[in-house]
Amino acid sequence: MQISFPQPVLSPCIGICQLGDDGLCVGCLRSADEIGRWLAMGAAERQHLMQIVLPKREAQRA
């Protein structure tokens, strides 16, 4: 019998939760829609957002 433990849901949230003028969170760079859907997203979608989408947004802000 193998015991399975739920995997923690990774999140880019850093506790600075405020939408900027561009519609993205000042802290994590997610849109309000992405924040609202976060727990319903599959692991692959969350990983894509964290590894591809959010780094591109951060580079564009710099």
Image (cartoon, rainbow, N blue to C red):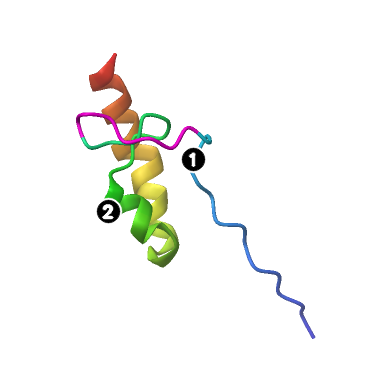
Question: Looking at the image, is 58 positioned above or below residue 46?
Answer: above
Q: Which mark is residue 33?
A: 2
Amino acid carrying label 1: it is Cys
Question: Between marks 1 and 2, how big is the CA–CA gap?
Answer: 14 Å
| Dominant secondary structure (helix, strand or loop) of the stretch shown in magenta | loop
Q: Which residue is farthest left?
A: 22
Q: Which one is nearer the viewer's eye here, 12 or 23?
A: 23
Left or right of residue 12: residue 19: left
Q: Amino acid at mark 2?
A: Asp
Contact (CB < 8 A) between labels 1 and 2? no
**3 on left or right of 26:** right
x, y (%) of residue 25?
A: 34, 36
Q: Residue at x 62, y 62 (%)?
A: 7
Q: Residue furthest bottom?
A: 1
Classify mark 2: helix, strand or loop: helix
Q: What secondary structure is marked by label 1? A: loop
Quick check: is 20 in the magenta stretch? Answer: yes
Q: Nearer the viewer, residue 55 or 23?
A: 23
Foreground pick, 5 / 13 = 13
Say which residue appears at 36% left-offset and 29% top-offset.
Answer: 26
Q: Which residue is mark 1?
A: 13
Q: Which residues are magenta?
A: 16-22
- On the rendered structure, is 60 left or right of 38? left
Please identify the quarter of the rendering in which residue 18 is found. Answer: top left
Q: Does the segment drawn in magenta span residue 21?
A: yes
Image coordinates of residue 22 in percent, x first then y, are 19, 31
Crowding at label 1, few (<14), some or many (≥20) Cα neighbours within 10 Å? some
Between 56 and 34, the residue placed more toward the observer is 34
**Residue 17, horizontal then vertical, whole percent:** 43, 37
